[in-house]
C-alpha cells in the first residue's frame, strides 16, 4: 500500500475541481460545484463535487459514481488504480514511491505495455526490412515518410513466428504474448503463432503515449479479414479508446473530425487537420463520445458515403447528441471517403467541405426522402411522416419552429397543419415516456443491486449498516466503542461487512479517515462510488449515538432463519443461541 502521506500530498497537488474541470464544465452551486456526469448521459447536472470539504470528493446522484480525485481519473480514463496514481503524480511532478507488496495484476499491465512498445518497434523496423511490400503499400497510399514515422506504422511479414521469436528473445513469455493478443495458440499443435501476418500495422496509442494495441490491414489482394484488430486486453478496451486521439487532443480546435478508419485518419492528418480520430474496428460507443466531449464541442462526421457509412452516421448522431456534442455531417461528392477526396481535390477543398458541413438535423431531414418516390403522393406522405418524427425530437421550441417552417416550404404544405402533426407526436411521446417511467418505477420496487445484491432481501438491515458506516465516517474516533458492540461478521450484507472491516483495519493502523481508503485495489470503481454515496445520501440526517445503538440492535435481532446454521462452527452456534437468549431477556 502506498504511504498515506504520499496520497495526501498527491491529492493536495491535484485539487479535484481542477482535475475534473479539465474534463467537464463545473458550475458553482452555493458551496458546491455541479456538472453533467461524464459517466452517463444526462441533461440536468446530478454530479456534485464537494471541493471545499476536508476530504474533497465527487458523487453522482444519477448513476452513483463517486470517490476522490484518484477514483475520478480511474473511471474517466478507464485505467487501474496505480495507473491513475501515476497519471496524477506525473501531472503534479511527483515521484510515486515503490510498493513493497507484489501486485501481479499491476506487474502484468506494465509488462504488456513494455511488450506492446517492443512489438511496435519490431513492426516499424520490418517496414524497411527485406520484405518491402508494406512500405510499397504505404507509398501507393501517398503517405509521406514523416507521417509514417509519426504514427509508427509498421509491417508484419508472412512468417508464422517472426514476432514470436523476436519477443521471446527479449524475455517475454507465452503468457504475456497471449495476454497482449499478439499471438494465438494452435488448436492442432498447441504452439503459438503470430496473430498479424502480411499486414501493414497501425499501433494504437493512448493519451499517455502508451502503445496499447494494434490494427492490421492486409496487403494481399484477397486477404481476409481486410482489417484485423486487437481484442480487448488488460491494457486495452476498444470501446473506450479512439485512434489518433493522442494527436487530436493537442489541437487548439474545439471541433473533432470523426473518420471511419485508420487510413482516413492518417490522410486527413497529413493534409493538415490534426483534430481527426476514428473508432477502433467497432461501431461508435457512448464511452468514445464522452472521451471526445472532453476535448471538443462539435464533431464533424466524415464516414464513407456508402449505405453502411450513412447508417453508421445516423447512429453516431444520436450518440454524440446524448453526451452534449453538436454533430455535423460532411457531404463528399465524387469520392467515397476523406482519403480519396483529399487525393482528388486537395486539402483546401476539404477545409471548405468542413466549413460547409450540414448540421445533423438538416442531414436527418434530407434523409427522410431516402427510399421514397418524390413524384408520388405516397412517397411524399411517407417522407413527411419521417420528417414529423425528426421534428418532434427537437426539444428547443424556437429551433423546432425554424426547421418546421423549412420543411413546410420544402414539401409545399400548410405550416399550421404540419405543426399540429408534430404537436400530436410530441404529446404521444410524452404519454409513452410517462407510461415507461411508471413501469420502470414498478420494476424498481425490488431492484437488483450489482454492488450490494443482498440489500434487496435485507432492506432494514442494509439501511442500519449504512447508518453505522455513515456515523463512523463522521466520527472515526467512535470506532472502538462501536466495534465492542458489533463485530464485522454480524453485518448482514457482504459488501457493507467489507467496508466495515477495511475501515476498522485502516483506522487501527493509525490512518486518518478519508474516502481514499476505499479507492485502492480492494474496491472496484462502482463499489467506491457506492461508499462515497453513503455520506452523500445521509448528508442532512443527524445520526446520534442512540441511532447507532438502535441500528446495532436491528442487526443483532435479525430473524433466526436469516442465519445459515450449517455454516456455523459449534462455538459460533453456541454464541448465536446465547445471543438469542440475551436478546429475549
Image (spheres, grey):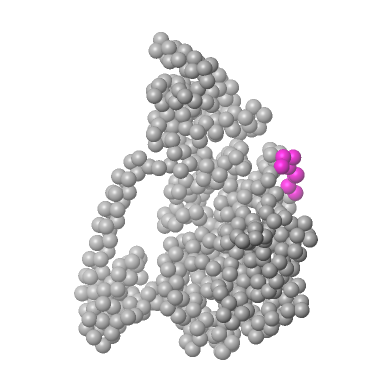
Looking at the picture, tell me which residue is in the foreground, 483 or 131.
131
The vertical placement of 450 against 191, above or below, is: above
What residue is drawn where x is 63% and y is 47%? 81
Q: Residue at x 64, y 56 (%)?
A: 179
For the record, the magenta segment spans: 95-102
Secondary structure predominantly adopted by residues drawn in magenta: loop
Front residue of 533 and 190: 190
Q: Position of residue 550 (x, y in %)?
A: 43, 22
Q: Across the whole image, how many numbered discs are drawn on residues?
A: 0
Q: Position of residue 247 (x, y in %)?
A: 64, 69
Q: Tell which of 52 and 445 is nearer to you.
A: 445
In this rendering, position of residue 364 left or right of residue 279: left
Q: Is residue 558 visible?
A: yes
Q: Quadrant of the N terminus?
A: top right
Could you say which quadrant of the image residue 269 lies in? bottom right
Q: In percent of the image, x 59 and y 55: which residue is there?
A: 77
Q: Considering only vertical position in the picture, is 358 above or below 72?
A: below
Judge whether residue 368 is colored magenta. Answer: no
Amino acid at each position: 500500500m502506498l504511504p498515506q502521506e504520499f496520497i495526501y500530498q498527491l491529492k493536495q497537488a491535484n485539487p479535484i475541481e481542477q482535475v475534473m474541470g479539465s474534463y467537464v464544465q463545473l458550475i458553482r452551486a452555493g458551496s458546491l460545484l455541479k456538472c453533467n456526469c461524464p459517466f452517463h448521459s444526462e441533461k440536468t447536472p446530478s454530479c456534485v463535487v464537494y471541493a471545499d470539504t476536508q476530504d474533497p470528493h465527487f458523487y453522482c446522484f444519477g448513476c452513483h459514481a463517486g470517490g476522490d480525485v484518484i477514483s475520478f481519473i480511474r473511471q474517466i480514463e478507464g485505467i487501474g488504480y496505480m495507473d491513475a496514481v501515476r497519471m496524477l503524480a506525473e501531472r503534479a511532478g511527483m515521484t510515486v514511491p515503490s510498493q513493497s507488496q507484489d501486485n501481479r495484476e499491476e506487474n502484468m499491465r506494465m509488462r504488456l505495455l513494455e511488450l506492446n512498445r517492443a512489438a511496435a518497434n519490431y513492426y516499424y523496423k520490418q517496414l524497411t526490412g527485406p520484405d518491402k511490400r508494406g512500405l510499397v503499400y504505404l507509398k501507393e497510399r501517398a503517405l509521406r515518410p514523416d507521417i509514417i514515422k509519426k504514427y509508427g506504422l509498421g509491417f508484419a511479414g508472412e512468417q508464422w513466428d517472426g514476432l514470436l521469436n523476436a519477443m521471446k528473445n527479449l524475455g517475454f513469455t507465452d503468457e504475456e504474448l497471449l495476454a497482449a493478443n499478439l499471438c494465438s495458440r494452435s488448436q492442432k499443435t498447441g504452439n503459438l503463432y503470430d496473430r498479424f501476418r502480411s499486414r501493414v500495422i497501425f499501433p494504437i496509442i493512448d493519451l499517455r503515449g502508451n502503445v496499447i494495441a494494434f490494427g492490421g490491414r492486409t496487403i494481399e489482394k484477397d486477404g481476409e479479414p481486410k482489417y484485423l484488430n486487437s481484442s480487448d486486453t488488460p491494457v486495452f478496451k476498444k470501446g473506450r479508446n479512439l485512434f489518433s486521439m493522442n494527436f487530436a487532443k493537442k489541437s487548439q480546435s474545439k471541433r473533432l473530425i470523426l473518420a471511419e478508419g485508420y487510413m482516413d485518419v492518417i490522410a486527413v492528418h497529413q493534409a493538415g487537420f490534426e483534430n481527426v480520430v476514428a473508432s477502433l474496428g467497432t461501431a461508435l460507443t457512448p464511452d468514445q463520445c464522452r472521451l471526445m466531449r472532453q476535448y471538443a464541442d462539435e464533431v464533424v462526421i466524415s464516414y464513407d458515403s456508402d449505405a453502411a457509412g450513412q447508417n453508421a452516421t445516423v447512429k453516431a448522431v444520436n450518440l454524440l447528441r446524448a453526451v452534449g456534442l453538436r454533430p455535423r455531417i460532411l457531404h463528399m461528392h465524387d469520392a467515397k471517403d476523406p482519403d480519396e477526396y483529399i487525393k482528388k481535390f486537395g486539402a483546401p477543398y476539404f477545409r471548405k467541405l468542413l466549413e460547409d458541413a450540414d448540421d445533423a438535423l438538416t442531414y436527418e431531414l434530407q434523409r427522410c426522402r431516402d427510399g421514397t418516390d418524390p413524384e408520388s403522393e405516397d412517397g411524399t406522405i411517407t417522407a413527411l411522416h419521417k420528417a414529423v418524427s425528426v421534428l418532434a425530437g427537437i426539444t428547443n421550441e424556437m429551433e423546432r419552429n425554424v426547421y418546421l417552417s423549412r420543411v413546410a416550404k420544402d414539401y409545399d404544405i400548410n405550416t399550421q397543419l404540419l405543426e399540429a402533426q408534430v404537436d400530436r407526436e410530441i404529446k404521444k411521446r410524452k404519454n409513452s415516456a410517462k407510461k415507461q417511467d411508471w413501469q420502470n418505477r414498478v420494476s424498481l420496487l425490488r431492484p437488483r443491486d450489482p454492488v450490494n445484491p443482498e440489500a434487496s432481501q435485507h432492506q432494514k438491515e442494509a439501511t442500519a449498516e449504512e447508518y453505522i458506516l455513515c456515523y463512523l465516517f463522521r466520527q472515526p474516533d467512535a470506532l472502538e466503542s462501536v466495534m465492542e458492540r458489533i463485530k464485522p461478521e454480524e453485518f448482514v450484507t457482504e459488501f457493507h461487512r467489507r467496508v466495515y472491516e477495511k475501515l476498522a483495519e485502516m483506522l487501527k493502523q493509525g490512518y486518518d479517515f478519508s474516502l481514499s481508503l476505499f479507492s485502492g485495489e480492494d474496491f472496484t470503481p462502482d463499489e467506491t462510488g457506492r461508499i462515497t454515496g453513503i455520506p452523500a445520501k445521509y448528508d442532512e440526517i443527524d445520526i446520534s449515538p442512540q441511532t447507532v445503538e438502535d441500528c446495532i440492535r436491528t442487526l443483532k435481532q435479525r430473524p433466526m432463519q436469516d442465519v445459515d446454521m450449517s455454516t456455523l462452527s459449534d462455538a459460533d452456534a453456541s454464541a448465536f443461541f446465547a445471543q438469542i437468549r440475551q436478546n429475549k431477556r
